[in-house]
């Protein structure tokens, strides 16, 4: 099988930071994939045909019997190999060096590496000041390097911090070059991939063309349906698929009546007017809001919306004759088969709403053209496809929409107030040039009325909470440190401009212990 890009394989031994290796390489326009070590057999390796291989770190000890190994054929594949941390130790063990664990061998956090006298190509640009800061995180250490290897860098606790057998293009480092605390780490990766002959052929323009070709090959002249949420991922997927197969794509946008102000109109206008993509705008707000009447439990809200969404989507999809494929905006972080050493069930904090389960139920095949991309790459692809920048940079919006920003019972009155307050808040954030610094910002309307005084009159209206967080992936978050001036000005505007709110608070809870949404 021929592959459209030069490929690098990352064999994952379960490190927490394996995804960061992929990020660093993608930034260098190198196409790479992460696969768990259990899957990387000799046959897999042959089929993948990597130009270079990186062995990630991992939590297991190579000194343990039955601990993870790379396939034997890797060592004779004739491609450059870089072992990181535990990957270094795996390599040393397999190539007949020795690794020891035990008291005094662990090293965590910042360390400084000094060079040996010999030069090494992957260290080009290193050691200008005589030493480099690196980030260590290892329990075991290499006690004897494998035959053919020499030492190129040492740290106080890692005499074999950098070793290599340059004749075979085998490199091994005890630290993590992919983390920001190893400031010259990106340079090391750059040197490694240059040495492996990568030409940086992974660009968004080339990716777009390949993706279009792949969609055409997969779908042929069959029909595809795509559930649009108005978010970046499903929108980019839809525009890409439309470029590939034109009007054989139909999008279904289910308006559950829980969208922000003007959202439905904006999404529909963008797809119909700018792209001319066949779009069913399913206004099902009565159905959803009716089903939510009297519901105040967050999980019941989520489950009600999730179930109805699937039913409604299915109804509309059934009207599209001959549809054989369902498009989804699944991203790479969702599909990486991570290596789990801990196992065990995890607790459900919230039932997330998505269209999972639909394909099986409907007997449709999946088209997932973003499966290989990280979020920022999806944005880059969106730009390549000409989506408006304001659309691409939009904050994430949850599937259950405003329902989970309206603790307690949902009423049309509360939703209308919430929409207005949210619009003023976002307008304030944009006016102050803060929108792109913030991961997500929104208003939650609280299920309490409070007493106020406006003019000469008494008010008895709703209180609301403003939320704004910074985050990299939504998994952890911190509140955004607005100035008091900004908060004061925004509160005044909301109370003056939004009828029904007479008190504004700012939520300064981080995640954990809070979550980003209120429910
Ligand atoms: P939480 O509230 O769990 O949210 O800290 C983390 C991120 O996920 C979004 N979110 C959802 N997105 N369906 C989605 O598509 C959902 O059911 C859902 N619930 C939360 C939330 O907006 C934040 O970005």
Image (tube, rainbow, N blue to C red):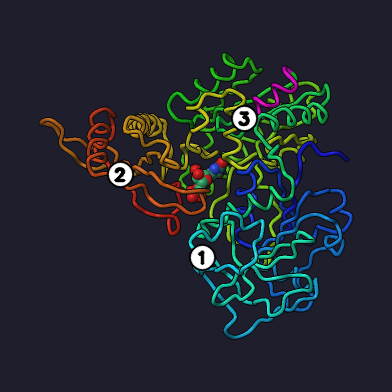
For marks 3 and 1, give the one nearer the viewer.
Answer: 1
Would you name the residue on which mark 3 appears? 236
Residue displayed at 44% across by 41% down: 440
**Residue 94 location in percent, x, y?**
80, 71
Magenta residue check for 241: yes
| Quadrant of the rendered image containing residue 271 | top right
Q: Earlier in the sequence, mark 3 or mark 1?
A: 1
Q: Residues within 10 Å of mark 2 (few under 14, many from 20)?
A: few
Outermost residue on the left side: it is 456
Q: Residues within 10 Å of mark 3 (few under 14, many from 20)?
A: many
On screen, residue 451 above or below 500? below
Bounds of the magenta segment: 235-247
Q: Is residue 73 left or right of residue 484?
A: right
Count of picture labels = 3
| Quadrant of the rendered image containing residue 291 | top right
Would you name the residue on which mark 1 appears? 131
In the foreground, 219 or 505: 219
In the foreground, 170 or 58: 170
């Amino acid at each position: 099988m021929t592959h459209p890009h030069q490929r690098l394989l990352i064999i994952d031994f379960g490190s927490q930071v394996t995804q960061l290796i992929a990020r660093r390489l993608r930034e260098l326009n190198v196409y790479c994939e992460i696969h768990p070590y259990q899957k990387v057999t000799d046959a897999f390796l042959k089929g993948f045909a990597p130009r270079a291989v990186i062995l990630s770190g991992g939590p297991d000890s190579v000194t343990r019997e039955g601990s993870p190994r790379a396939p034997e054929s890797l060592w004779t594949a004739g491609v450059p190999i870089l072992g990181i941390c535990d990957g270094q130790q795996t390599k040393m063990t397999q190539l007949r060096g020795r690794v020891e664990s035990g008291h005094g061998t662990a090293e965590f956090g910042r360390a400084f590496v000094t060079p040996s006298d010999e030069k090494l190509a992957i260290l080009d640009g290193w050691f200008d000041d005589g030493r480099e800061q690196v980030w260590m995180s290892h329990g075991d250490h290499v006690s004897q390097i494998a035959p053919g290897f020499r030492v190129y860098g040492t740290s106080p606790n890692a005499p074999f911090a950098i070793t290599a057998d340059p004749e075979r293009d085998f490199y091994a480092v005890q630290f993590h070059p992919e983390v920001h605390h190893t400031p010259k780490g990106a340079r090391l990766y750059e040197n490694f991939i240059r040495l492996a002959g990568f030409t940086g052929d992974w660009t968004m323009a080339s990716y777009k063309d390949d993706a279009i070709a792949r969609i055409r090959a997969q779908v042929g002249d069959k029909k595809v349906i795509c559930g649009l949420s108005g978010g970046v991922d499903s929108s980019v997927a839809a525009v890409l698929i439309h470029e590939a197969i034109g009007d054989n794509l139909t999008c279904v946008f289910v308006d559950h009546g829980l969208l922000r102000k003007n959202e439905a109109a904006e999404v529909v206008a963008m797809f119909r007017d700018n792209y001319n993509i066949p779009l069913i705008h399913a206004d099902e707000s009565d159905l959803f809001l009716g089903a939510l009447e009297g519901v105040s439990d967050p999980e019941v809200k989520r489950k009600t919306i999730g179930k109805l969404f699937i039913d409604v989507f299915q109804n509309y999809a059934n009207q599209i004759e001959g549809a054989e494929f369902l498009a989804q905006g699944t991203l790479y972080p969702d599909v990486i088969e991570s290596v789990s050493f801990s196992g065990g069930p995890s607790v459900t904090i919230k039932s997330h709403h998505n269209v999972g389960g639909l394909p099986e139920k409907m007997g449709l095949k999946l088209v997932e053209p973003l499966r290989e991309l990280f979020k920022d790459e999806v944005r880059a692809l969106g730009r390549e496809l000409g989506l408006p920048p304001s659309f691409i940079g939009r904050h994430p919006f949850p599937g259950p929409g405003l329902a989970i920003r309206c603790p307690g019972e949902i009423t049309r009155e509360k939703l209308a107030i919430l929409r207005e307050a949210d619009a003023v808040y976002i307008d304030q954030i944009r006016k102050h040039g803060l929108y792109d610094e913030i991961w997500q910002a929104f208003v939650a309307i609280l299920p309490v009325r409070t007493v106020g005084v406006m003019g000469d009159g008494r008010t008895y209206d709703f209180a609301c909470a403003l939320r704004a967080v910074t985050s990299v992936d939504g998994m952890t978050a911190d509140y955004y440190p607005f100035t008091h001036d900004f908060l004061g000005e925004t509160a005044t505007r909301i109370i003056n401009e939004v009828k029904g709110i007479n008190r504004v608070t700012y939520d300064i809870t981080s995640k954990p212990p809070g979550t980003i949404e209120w429910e």
